[in-house]
Image (cartoon, rainbow, N blue to C red):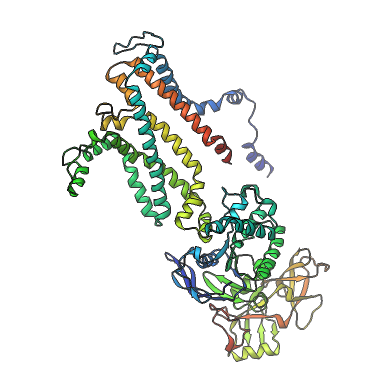
Amino acid sequence: MRAAVEQRARAYRAPLNTPRTRLLRRFPTHWLFLLPMLLLVVVFFFVPVILNLILAFTDMTLSLRWEFVGLKNYVKFLQDPLIPQIAKNTLVYVSATLSINVIFGLFLALLTTYFVKRENVGLAFRSLWLLPRMTPPVVYALLWIWMTDPTEYGLLNMMLQAFGLPPLSWRTEYPMATIILVNGMVGASFGMIIFSAAIKSIPVDYIRAAKVDGASDLGVVRWVILPLLKWPLMFVTTWQTLSLLASYEYILLVTQGGPNHRSEVWSLYAYYKAFASGQYGYGAAIAMVLVAVAVIIALLMLRIFGFRRLMELMR
Amino acid sequence: MASIRLEHLTKRFGNVVAVDDLNLEIADGEFVALLGPSGCGKTTTLLMIAGIYEPTEGKIYFDDVCVNDVAPKDRYVGLVFQSYALYPHMSVFDNIAFPLRLNKTPRAEIERRVREVAKLAQIENLLDRRPAQLSGGQQQRVALCRALVKEPEVLLLDEPLSNLDARLRIETRAEIKRLQKELGITTILVTHDQIEALSMADRVAVMHQGVLQQYTTPEELYNRPANLFVASFIGDPPMNLFEVRYRRGGELELPGGRALRLPEPLARRLEARRLEEGATLTLGLRPEDVELSETETPEGFPAEVYLAETLGGDLLVHFRLGDGGDGPRLRALTDPERRVTMGQRLWLVPDPNKLHLFGPDGRSLLAEAEEEAPVPHPQRA
């Protein structure tokens, strides 16, 4: 009996003081677990930013020579006649797309989780909206190019013709509206998913209580659901602002920023300067200014929305 | 204030029948408890009355007006949830004022009524706080205030006390009962706690697997359970139930062969039912209706002490019936002063006027044959 108890207890006893266990105890195991993520962040985030920072002080061109020129690129940036238009485009693009992403995403989430009572219908609808996100950007952009085709075979133009209207050249006449729609339609699904999850996690008793207390469906949304979505709303707004500031791939694919820079945003401009005209140094400087702007906006938003309180709330 | 009538109320979720053909009448100003184990359909019934769930079949009447198609907000019910469901983003004041704001009550009136109801529940000093800053008991009061502030026709309480600690529960129980009597609001309490139901309600509806078992006063429920389910569910410690054989001439044969002579009126009532000789019946004996005797008596049955538990005011003794202590288990409540030892032999003397007898179908045989109500339907009060 006693032997059996001792044998079973052996497994739970404190580790022995052997050379092997001493070595194990000193080994910084926590760093081992942190390493993959740290590597990822350092290699793909810190190193590029620092490289970019250095690059912005050079006059590097396609010949890839490191020639340091001081602040020349930044001076050039301030004198660049296109910058005011690029900045304005970026402001319009980011704020309009952000509104679609947040408001339309919220609308979709409310529709599919609260107003549509059948769970599987809402789920099917949400999955549908996720399709563009699962599609490769090139394919998604191609679909929009077909839709906005200037001939009478474009999908939007077919719709116009059904009403007896002449075909429109969407991408050249409304380039900004086009890129906002292209990004908004795919971007809204992010907010939709976050908001849907948040709405579903609201205890059903809150909604029942509000209904019994006299709230209509819209009242429930206004007084119960929206206040409880405060944090997800702030998170999605901040996240989307930052990701929109840096995004350009759909614009590049659909309008190429044209016609005549009318749909060219900051990150696309940096891309063109660096990779189309080979001015790596100047492109890096433009990107650096964008990084600085993004950091300032991010800090401001964290401050305004009181993210520190969000962290405290997570009890 | 309103009276409530449920007619053939049925709720199915897919293939699951949550509430099965429920008929219930609740008088104006009455306090009724829906009592049953979890999953018996009591909360489903409450949510149908509140208008959250739509009945699959049947009708709900408030004051003889069918409210099946009336939206929850137009039913004038106050609902207190087990979880309290206080909005975390609003202060206590705003939580209580919420129903008034929704029906566009003037600001001054809101202020007055919120303070009034808060005073009633003694939470005036908490109005500026957030729900997260309150204790469970305080949250419960706020939830009650929110339900009462709109002066509802019907007050619905869904397990309002089950999240409170034992002591607070007893206090709050009494307070709610007093409040209900003062305000005279028709009230329905859903609970799985029989003490709560019996102590607070005027009438109790016992439900089991969606079917109403018995609907009557707490005393009646305790003294004359209509069937085996109610008999075993009501009472703590629960009623002793064991099988006996019926003998013509007013005798029951207990396990072990001894006979129990039934009192004259009961014997005659059984005679009227024309039971077969040797029919298997279930005898019910409440632990408090059994006397213990140290010496053999003609009405007594030998039993062996199996275990004794002190409950404070009472001593609960577990027995095994029979000469050798090999019969069915049985519990008896007795004076804690009495000294009982394990294995001791005692004689149990049941109170002949407090016997409960159930037929093979589980229904009580104590009711007169002609007054026997079909079990799933309510007894009209």
**Of the pair B234 and B3, the residue shown nearer to us:** B3
**Of the pair B180 and A150, the residue shown nearer to us:** A150
Position of residue A171 in the picture relative to residue B204 (left or right): left
User: Residue A243: where, in percent of width, then height?
Assistant: 40, 32
Q: Which residue is drawn at 17% across and 43% down?
A: A166
Quarter of the rendering containing residue A73: top left
Q: In this view, does B309 lie above or below B24?
A: above
Look at the image and tell me whether residue A118 can be seen.
yes
Q: Residue at x 59, y 61 (%)?
A: B147
User: Residue B9: where, in percent of width, then height?
Assistant: 48, 73
User: Residue B121: where, in percent of width, then height?
Assistant: 68, 59
**Of the pair B323 and B267, the residue shown nearer to us:** B267
Say which quadrant the N terminus of chain B sits in: bottom right
Q: How many marks?
A: 0
**Of the pair B349 and A143, the residue shown nearer to us:** A143
Position of residue A315 in the picture relative to residue B54 (left or right): right
- Residue located farthest toward the left when viewing the structure as drawn: A152
Q: Is residue B84 above or below residue A241?
A: below
Q: Which residue is drawn at 32% across and 23% down?
A: A269
Say which quadrant the C terminus of chain B sits in: bottom right
Look at the image and tell me whether residue B84 can be seen.
no
Quarter of the rendering containing residue B375: bottom right
Q: Is residue B333 above or below residue B146?
A: below
Quarter of the rendering containing residue B310: bottom right
User: Residue B153: where, in percent of width, then height?
Assistant: 57, 69
Position of residue B78 in the picture relative to residue A176 (left or right): right
